[in-house]
Amino acid sequence: MNTILLIGAIVILFLLIGFLLKVVRAAITTAIGIVLIVLVLQFVFGVEPQEIWGEVMKVWENITQVFRR
């Protein structure tokens, strides 16, 4: 009985580790994408990060207002 329980725990552990690796990989990919977009906007178009953040907040407020109605 303990052997079956141990095998089940190991399988669950491998599945959890695989899931966590996928989540971390997706988070890192998203963060790199955001950094690249901000850098392009800053260096190519001269847009300050504060301006970008202000626009992001405006868009977020508009989205939340749509769902409140």
Image (cartoon, rainbow, N blue to C red):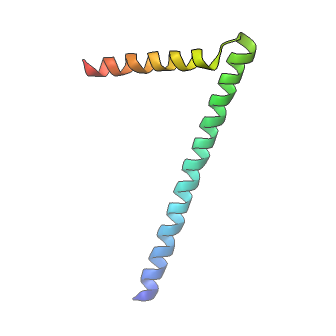
**Left or right, residue 29 beside residue 5:** right
Furthest toward the front, the residue is 50
Residue 68: image location, x then y, percent: 27, 21
Q: Residue at x 54, y 66 (%)?
A: 14
Using the rendered view, name the quadrant where residue 2 is placed: bottom left
Q: Is residue 35 left or right of residue 15?
A: right
Q: Is residue 21 above or below residue 43?
A: below
Q: Position of residue 35 (x, y in %)?
A: 66, 30
Give the answer, above or below, for where 25 lies relative to 45. Answer: below
Q: Farthest left residue?
A: 69
Decide which of 45, 50 is in the foreground and name it: 50
Image coordinates for residue 55, horizontal then vertical, percent = 52, 15
> In the image, what residue occupies the spot 52% across and 55% down?
19
Identity of the residue drawn at 48% across and 79% down = 7
In the picture, the quarter occupied by the C terminus is top left
Q: Residue furthest right?
A: 43
Residue for point 39% across, 89% down: 1
Residue closest to the eye, 14 or 65: 65
Query: In the displayed structure, would residue 65 be above or below residue 34?
Result: above
Q: In which quarter of the image is residue 20?
A: bottom right
Question: How many numbered markers are drawn?
Answer: 0
